[in-house]
Amino acid sequence: MAFQEHSYRDTWVEVDLGNITRNVEQVIRSTGQQLDVMAVVKADGYGHGAVRAAAAAVQGGAVFLGTALLEEAIELREAGFDLPILVLGRTRPEDAETAREYNISLTVFQKEWLEEAAACMAPGQALSVHLKTDTGMGRIGLRSDEEIIDFLETVSSQPAFDLEGIFTHFATADEQETSYFYRQHERFKEIVELTGKIVQLPPYIHCGNSAAGMRFPDRCFTMFRFGISMYGLTPSAEINEELPFALQPAFSLYSRLVQVKKISPGESISYGATYTAEKEEYIGTVPIGYADGWNRHHSTNGGYVLINGEKAPIVGRVCMDQMMVRLSGPEETGTKVTLIGKDNGTEITVLDAAERLGTITYEIPCMISKRVPRKYISSRN
Ligand SMILES: *Cc1c(COP(=O)(O)O)cnc(C)c1O
C-alpha cells in the first residue's frame, strides 16, 4: 500500500503534514474541546498516505482512527498505532476473528452477523463493535426500533462482543438546507435514548462527519469523524464560506516542464488535433496524464496550471502520461509547474480542480494514482 520511496519522475504530490496536525488542533479548539476526534484515513488517507496522515492527526489530538476496510485498519496496526481503530464499512463475519486479534473495532448492523462471527471466534478478549444505525443515509445500518432492540439484546447477551459505540451518518450535513439534517439528528437522538433503555450506553456515540463536526458540534454527542477537512479541504463549495476556522490544505501537485517548443500558426497539439495555434506560441510538455489520475476533462472547462505565478492553459487533449500547456514565453526545461497549490501568491485549490471536473473535493486527491509519489513536508516543525 505504501507509496514508493524513490522516484525517477518529475511529477509529485507534496503533502504538508503540519497542516493536517493544525486542522485537527483547530477543529478541537472550535468545538470547545468537548468532543473526541476520530481521524478518518480510509482510501490511503484520502490519497495523502494513511500512515503519515494518521500520525499527523494523532499529533493534533485525534484519539480514534477510522478506515473503510479491515485491511486499511491492519495497515495502521502494523505501522504501530495503538489507539482504537474502527472499520466503518461492513466486514465479513468470518474475518471478525482477525479483527479481534488486531484489536480493531468493527461496524455491525445485522443480528445474523453476530451469530456467524461468534461461531468463528476463538475465546478470549471480546471484539469491540459499533452499532451502525441508518437514520436517512440509506446505505448501511439498522432502521426500525424493533430491529435495534432485537440487535442490542443479542449483542449484550454475547460475551464475544463488547458494544463500544453506536453511530449514524448524515446525508446532507454539508448543505445550506438543514431540514433533512435535523430530521436525521432527531431520529438518532431517539435511537440513543432507546439504546440507553436496553443496554448501558457505550462510551462512543457519534454521528458527525467533517461538515457536522464543524457546523453543529453541539449535535455530535461524544465524538465526530473528521475526514475531508482534516486534510484542509471543504466538504462542499456551498459551506466553504461559513467554516469556523481557515482550513489549511495539505495536498499540492507539482511537475516540471520536460520540453518547450515554439509552434507556428496553424499547427496543432495532441490527439485529435483539437487545438490549433492562431499565432506563434510557446508550448510546454508536462509529464502527467490520465493514468496519474489527471483526468482528460482537465483540458476542457478552462483548465490551467501555474508557471512562475502565471496561468498557463492546458491545450489539446490530456494523454495517458503527458499533457501540453501554452506558455507566455520561452520557459526553461525543468521549470516547476503547479497543478494544485500555491505559486508566487497565486493558487489553484483542490476545489478549483474539482469544480472543473464537476465533482467534489474528496475525489481529487483520491484519484491521483499511486504512480505519483507523495513527498512529505511539515510547515510546522
Ligand atoms: C468517510 C466517512 C466519514 C468522513 O466524512 P468526511 O465528510 O470526509 O468528514 C465519516 N463517517 C463515515 C461513515 C464515512 O464513511
Image (cartoon, rainbow, N blue to C red):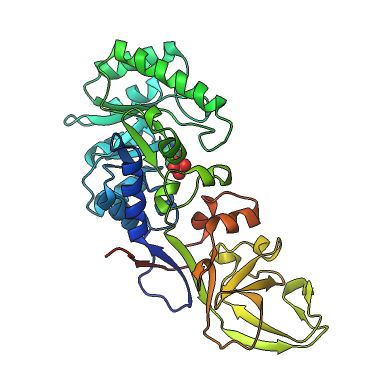
Identify whether 308 is placed above or below 17: below
Front position in the image: 61 or 154: 61
Which residue is pictured at 65% across the width and 76% down the height? 324
Q: Pinpoint residue 41: horizontal percent, then vertical percent.
A: 38, 48
Q: Quadrant of residue 283?
A: bottom right
Quadrant where ligand 1 appears: top left
Which residue is pictured at 32% across the width and 40% down the height? 37
On the rendered image, what quadrant is the C terminus found in? bottom left
Identify whether 36 is placed above or below 265: above
Which residue is pictured at 33% across the width and 34% down the height? 223
Q: Pinpoint residue 152: horizontal percent, then vertical percent.
A: 33, 16
Q: In the image, 36: left or right of 347?
A: left
Q: Pinpoint residue 136: horizontal percent, then vertical percent.
A: 52, 25
On the rendered image, what quadrant is the N terminus found in? bottom left
Q: Which residue is outermost to the left?
A: 124
Q: In the image, 187: left or right of 285?
A: left
Residue 205 visible? The answer is yes
Front position in the image: 140 or 169: 169
